[in-house]
Image (cartoon, rainbow, N blue to C red):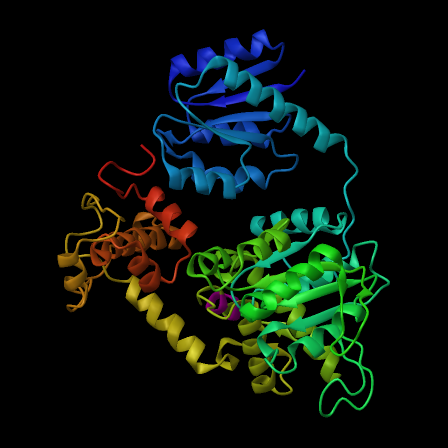
Amino acid sequence: MGNILIIDDDEEVRETLLSLTRRMRMSGEAVGTLRQGIARLRQGGVDVAFLDVTLPDGNGLDALSEIKALPDSPEVIILTGRGDPDGAELAIQGGVWDYLLKPSPIKDTMLTLERAFRYHEGKRGSTPVALRLEDVVGKSQPMRACFDAVAGAAGSGASVLITGETGTGKELIARTIHANSPRAAKPFVVVDCAALTETLVESTLFGHKKGAFTGADSDRTGLVKMADGGTLFLDEVGEMPLNLQKAFLRVLQERRFRPVGGTSELESDFRLIAATNRTLARMVEQGTFRSDLLYRIKTINITLPPLRERAEDVKPLCVFRVGQLCEQYGVPLKGFDPDVFQVLEGYDWPGNVRELFNVLERAFVAAGPERTLYAMHLPQDVRIKVAKAQLGKGRETPAGPASAPQPVSFASPPQADREQQAAPAAAPVSGPLPVDPASGQTLKDCKEVAERAYMEALVRHARGDVQRALEVSGLSRSHLYALLKKWGLAVDGPAVGS
């Protein structure tokens, strides 16, 4: 009944958990390093893994994506000897079952283990859902997690909120959910909330009767009624005017509405999917979005990762898009020089997939009749930005890449520090990083050295202000904390993950 793996460098913890698994009539194994744990997990057959955060050869949180990408990956229960809210956030985002603080009561640990095992057994016995993913491209772990969420949403009639940066493909995911749902044969109706005007918004959504206002020469069916039996997609729902939010909340609750100028209510059986690139929770705090409406539209939440956090998807996206362009223009299929992918994977893609597709079309046009796309065909602004970024990585901090990490507090800085932030930035990093291929140093090794040097310089420059660090680096909050943990940089004094 179940095979449990314990990855922890504390022998006492390993023995305690092994004893616990025996009491529960489960099979248990224990290793003391991350490398040994990953090697064992690759062999398969593990149902639940207890994973320590701070291990002699790495941070357990950094290995989550690799573990979750394994075939029949186990449920992961994180163990840590130090409370870390940001670590808990990263762990949950990484798909862990639970996050336990050592020492955890035996009763609580047994209950968590039993539930995780039962859940894993249930997943193993369930029939996989075959999704229609006609235009959705991605093989990275973040996208595979999204596909799992899409499969769950497609089989449900609950409201879905899709969040993510501009250009990540929110409408495409919404259409994919609809296409895989029981409502697939019915309409998919798009409401662009950013384009709704104050004067015509109710008429657009709910329709109107002839003579309801000047210019209403005939009855008009609104978008809500058009979605009857199908899916109503509210694109950029964060832009919905506040005065409309209350009216729309009632529509969601009752599925009934009255057209402008009408005397009776109509019904519409629609499934709601909404999308936004804004943080609605923050808008609720600011009073620009209703909390009760947020709860109604956020039964299921799917967050799409930015393209910079799934670089391995760049190549398949390129092949897919150029194939589309060749078919569209009626020309033979074009190939790629390897340098194209090297440039594109080095770009940070602020516009995400939408920007990538635009860049590829510009390169396609620039290539003309040539059968192969080369880096020279890519837009100059992209190539220049990548070249500058690569040259910038060839520098080190004044203290050197081996200098000890400096404690940084990402709490709100005092007034004096805020005033200092208006001053010129700290001295730029200068001097070449140690690069020596003759010593066996790989390109990956060199990138790691540059990455650490950048992160050390970033925390010094941020002066304890996390928002400043996010704005300067262009990183997401979760990616920033992941890199801080990776390089052992300190938050509020002690090293991260200790």
Identify the residue shown where x is 57% and y is 75%.
194
Prevalent SS, magenta region: helix
- Where, by quadrant of the figure, is residue 235 drawn? bottom right
Magenta extent? 340-344
The picture places residue 492, in percent across and down from the top left corner, at: 24, 41
Front residue of this view, candidates 498 and 119 = 119
- Quadrant of the drawing holding the N terminus: top right
**Image position of 442 (left or right of 202):** left
- Where, by quadrant of the figure, is residue 190 drawn? bottom right
The picture places residue 394, in percent across and down from the top left corner, at: 28, 62
Identify the residue shown where x is 56% and y is 13%.
21
Which residue sits furthest right?
185
- Quadrant of the drawing holding the C terminus: top left
Q: Reply above or below: 485 against 133.
A: above
**Image position of 377 (left or right of 152):** left
Q: Reply above or below: 277 against 410.
A: below
Query: Is residue 343 inside the magenta stretch?
Result: yes
Which residue sits furthest front?
263
**Whether residue 303 can be seen here:** no
The picture places residue 78, in percent across and down from the top left corner, at: 47, 30
Identify the residue shown where x is 83% and y is 60%.
184
**Whether residue 283 can be seen here:** yes
